[in-house]
């Protein structure tokens, strides 16, 4: 059975801190890993990673995939209160269905 | 271009009642799916469809039915609501089932079963 585990489950930091969120997976025939940000409502897409070692960046957010370690990290530098959200990791395997982790709840205090 | 729309936004049902959650997209996406999200559980796939006339079960399909008669619409039916189905339901769609897809999520339906 495909499985995605995120850590930590929750994290509280101060504005300006840098955070690293982790996602590890066990899937058959890995195809892609996706990161989403969920604030009050629906998740919004951040990154999709398919190749190991390639970093995807968008402003202060970046993510990298390690296919050897079956994991990915999401980095957020110079955090702001607007970064407070649940960050979801999802993996697509051979079943062609997305399997989601439970998410990391990030709280950024001013 | 409205994206993915869901109705209703909120619903309260009594145990045993049936209802349909509506989902529609106007992006001509082939792939549509339904998820439920419970506290501390992340998103779990209920049913999905890779095109009109084709549906399949996800991780937690029991108690739910779907159909896909058109590309645009993918309704989710609760046959006989149970308190365990209290959850937030998200519909999502994407261009296709191949590697390069990203899912667009609807705003969600918050369902309470008493």
Image: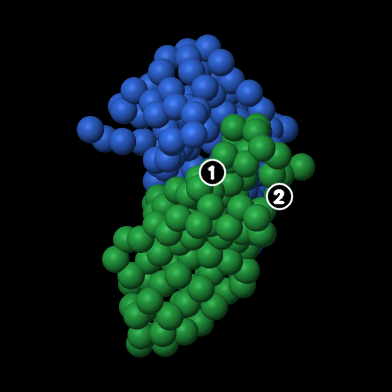
Question: Residue B110: x percent and y percent?
Answer: 50, 48
**What is the quadrant of residue B93 in the picture?**
top left
Q: What crowding class fits label 2: few (fewer than 14 Cα within 10 Å), some (14-19), or many (20 or more)?
A: some
Q: Which residue is at a point 40% across and 64% down the rendered structure image? A: A62
**Dots 2 and 1 on the same chain:** yes
SS state under label 2: strand
Question: Residue A78: x percent and y percent?
Answer: 34, 80
Task: Residue under label 1, please give it.
Answer: A32
The N terminus of chain B appears in which quarter of the rendering? top left
> Who is closer to the viewer here, B90 or A12?
A12
Question: Residue A74: x percent and y percent?
Answer: 48, 65
In the rendered structure, the residue with mark 1 lies on which chain?
Answer: A
* Circles 2 and 1 in contact, beta carbons < 8 Å: no
- Where A11 falls versus B14 (above or below)? below
The hue of chain B in the figure is blue
Q: Is residue B27 left or right of residue B69?
A: left
> Who is closer to the viewer here, B28 or B113?
B28
Q: Which chain is green?
A: A
Q: Which mark is residue A52?
A: none
**From this viewpoint, is residue B36 visible?**
no
> Who is closer to the viewer here, A7 or B107?
A7
Q: Is residue A94 left or right of residue B1?
A: right
Q: What crowding class fits label 1: few (fewer than 14 Cα within 10 Å), some (14-19), or many (20 or more)?
A: some
Q: Which residue is at a point 57% across and 39% down the rendered structure image? A: A31
Task: Residue under label 2, please give it.
Answer: A26
Q: Which residue is at a point 50% across and 45% down the rendered structure image? A: A50
Tell me, what colour scheme is on the image? by chain
Q: Which residue is at a point 31% across and 28% down the rendered structure image? A: B27
């Amino acid at each position: 059975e495909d499985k995605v585990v995120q850590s930590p489950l929750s994290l509280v930091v101060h504005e300006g801190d840098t955070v690293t969120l982790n996602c590890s997976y066990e899937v058959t025939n890995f195809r892609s890993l996706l990161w989403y940000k969920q604030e009050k409502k629906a998740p919004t897409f951040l990154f999709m990673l398919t190749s190991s070692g390639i970093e995807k960046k968008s402003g202060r957010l970046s993510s990298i995939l390690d296919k050897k370690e079956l994991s990915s990290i999401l980095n957020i530098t110079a955090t702001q209160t607007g970064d407070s959200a649940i960050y979801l990791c999802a993996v697509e395997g051979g079943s062609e269905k997305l399997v989601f982790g439970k998410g990391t709840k990030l709280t950024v205090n001013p | 271009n409205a994206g993915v729309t869901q109705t209703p936004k909120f619903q309260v049902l009594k145990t045993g009642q049936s209802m349909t959650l509506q989902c529609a997209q106007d992006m001509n996406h082939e792939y549509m799916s339904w998820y439920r999200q419970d506290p501390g559980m992340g998103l779990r796939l209920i049913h999905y469809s890779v095109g009109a006339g084709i549906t399949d079960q996800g991780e937690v399909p029991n108690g739910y039915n779907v159909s896909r008669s058109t590309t645009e619409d993918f309704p989710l039916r609760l046959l006989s609501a149970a308190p365990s189905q209290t959850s937030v339901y998200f519909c999502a769609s994407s261009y296709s089932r191949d590697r390069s897809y990203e899912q667009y999520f609807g705003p969600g339906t918050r369902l309470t079963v008493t």
